[in-house]
Amino acid sequence: MIGSIAGLLTTIAFVPQVIKILKTKDTRSIAFETCLLQVAGVFLWIIHGLVQSDTAIIMANVVTLCLTSIILVCKLLSRKHGVEVEADVLKDK
Amino acid sequence: MIGSIAGLLTTIAFVPQVIKILKTKDTRSIAFETCLLQVAGVFLWIIHGLVQSDTAIIMANVVTLCLTSIILVCKLLSRKHGVEVEADVLKDK
């Protein structure tokens, strides 16, 4: 039971971050390497879950993979458009 | 084996984020609710690990708890000092 709640919390934890990024388009204080490591780690958790045939691990980490991938893509896009995104953010001040 | 690597990656993933925050003092694009949910979830993972006497889960999540707590405290501090932190960040531009 505690493990399921823990898994649920660490999965849905990324939802507010995704919402905040989509609203503000600001990813400046988010570390790119953190996004990369999270996506890689969560992908491996899915492989682990498949090997162990553990549906809970698979489901939780598929959701987390989607959320962390969105954050990673937004980070890549803001890096690519570097200045504009920052300008937009500053303009909204 | 895959689970240990996955656990290692999702644990050390927070290190670049902590380093970036300590360097820039900028937590603006980080969602406070995400920090809160991560700390709560990771804390429950430790309880789960204790109940299951699973040292790997306990160790990985104790490290993650430390890292996510640093991020949460920095976020709280930057919220408390709201303007100054932003001013510092903008001043460095």
Image (cartoon, coloured by chain):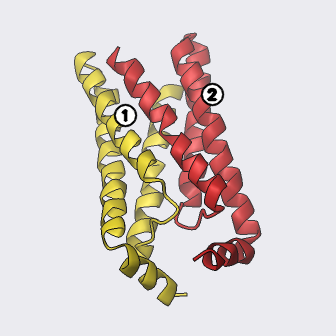
Chain colours: A yellow, B red
SS for tag 1?
helix
User: Where, quadrant-wise, is the N terminus of chain B in this rendering?
Assistant: top left
Name the residue type under label 1: Gly
Q: Give the amino acid type for the residue marked by disc 2 in the picture.
A: Val
**Residue B4 position in % (x across, y down):** 41, 19
The residue under the point 65% across, 79% down is: B91
Residue under mark 2: which chain is it in? B
Res. A1 in view: no
Badge 2 crowding class, 10 Å Cα cut-off, few under 14, some 14 to 19, many 20 or more, is some
What residue is rendered at 54% in x and 49% in y? B17
For the C terminus of chain B, the quadrant is: bottom right
| Badge 2 element | helix
Q: Residues within 10 Å of mark 1 (few under 14, many from 20)?
A: many
> Foreground: B42 or A30?
A30
Gap in angstroms between the C-alphas marked 1 and 2:
17 Å
Q: Which of the 4 quarters of the picture holds residue A78?
A: bottom left
Residues B44 and B61: in front is: B61
Q: Are dots 1 and 2 in contact, CB under 8 Å?
A: no
* Residue A6 image position (x, y, % from top left): 51, 34
In the rendering, at what x and y percent does residue B29 appear?
A: 52, 66
Q: Is residue B52 above or below residue A42?
A: above
Residue most toward the top?
A: B53
* Residue B6, disc: none
* Percent of width and height locating residue B59: 59, 20
> Which residue is under mark 1?
A41
Residue drawn at (36%, 66%), measured in percent from left and top? A79
Q: Are marks 1 and 2 on the same chain?
A: no
Q: Name the mark on residue B62.
A: 2
Q: Please say whether residue B65 is visible from this viewpoint.
A: yes
Give the side of residue A16 with respect to residue B75, left or right: left
